Amino acid sequence: MRGQWDLDRERTGYGYSVENQTISNLIDEILDELGPCASDDLIREIIVTAVKLAQEGSDRGDLKIIRTTIKELRYAFKVFAKYRDRPKITVFGSARTSPNDPAYRAAFEFGRMMAEAGYMVITGAGPGIMAAGHEGAGQDSSIGLNIRLPFEQAPNETINGDEKLINFRYFFTRKLFFVKESYALVLMPGGFGTHDEGFETLTLIQTGKSAMKPVVMLDEPGGGYWKQWLSFVEEQVLGRGYISPEDMSLFYVTDDPLAARDEIRRFYRIYHSARYVEHRAKLALRLNQPVGPEVIDVLNERFADILVNGRIEQGEAFPEERDEVDLLNLKRLIIPFDQRQFGRLRQLIDTLNQLG
């Protein structure tokens, strides 16, 4: 039986190869034939994985899942690549919301405001809240991630037939793009699917598996859907100690589309993005504009509890960030973050945006 060290080598790609030298040489020939590629090491691992599946006699049903997953991911990456320079927000909500529902009108208004602010609006491409968000944003600013279902999920008129409509077989591949490609996620009133997306996104952010971003629960004006949800979270989830008080900072509840828009814009006032550097020993927060030493002093004083050692400092891009050329000129806040208290990290970003 292989030891844990061998398993870790395979998981990380170190020494990840096929034992058959003839096949290994053929893989090298394929890569040579493809020509120069900045990520040929990753392409090689993908090919090696396919070979291993064949060598291990993988079940045909399992192989179909892998095949469809890779095809869906490749196509979706291709579509999104055309719009990589445009910020995007994802809107969730019920497919059963009628056009005369106040929530429908709120979603329409929110989509319109976000498009005017330069954002594209991603929805599940169906009717209801999804159609409202796309109608408000307009076709040029809409992206649809449709799921193939036997009911409810024909593409809405705004996105139907557009090149930005992507059809998925699997929910999990579709979910990846809802979160990965968005600058923020907005949840309107909805059913199981809306709550599924909301709780999964909060879990990913709370555990550091997703980039920090705004999560907004948006009701229709005067509505109580998310207020009642908030009461449940406060009384039963927070009240029983299932989450920490600072985790309540990971989302924002409002019944005003303008307030939802402003929450998203406020989050990116100073903060731009983040990346772990120096083998994940530090977290670099990229800044839209530099901040003064007095701001850094406040951050060090208020958030010393999430620092492993040392202090928060302002600096330049790290060598491992050279693959993100467009961001190299941005200043960084360099944080020896404990990688545990992500609710506190969100509070740090809010304080940075407020004081910067």
Image (spheres, rainbow, N blue to C red):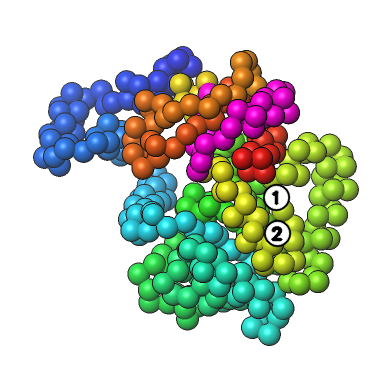
Kind of residue at badge 2: Met
Q: Can see residue 340?
A: no
Q: Quadrant of residue 240?
A: top right
Residue 126 vertical placement versus 48 (above, below): below
**Does 57 sit left or right of 145 as displayed?**
left
Reading the chain from its start, which is encountered first: label 2 or label 1? 2
Please say if 273 is above or below 251: above
Give coordinates of residue 183: x percent, y percent.
53, 52
Mark 1: secondary structure: loop
What's the distance in space between the residues labelled 2 and 1, CA to CA?
7 Å
Quadrant the N terminus occupies: top left
**Residues at marks 2 and 1 touching, judged by CB atoms closer than 8 Å:** yes
Q: Is residue 225 visible?
A: yes
Q: Which residue is mark 2?
A: 217
x, y percentage for residue 271?
Answer: 56, 42
Q: Which mark is residue 251?
A: 1
Q: Is residue 263 magenta?
A: no
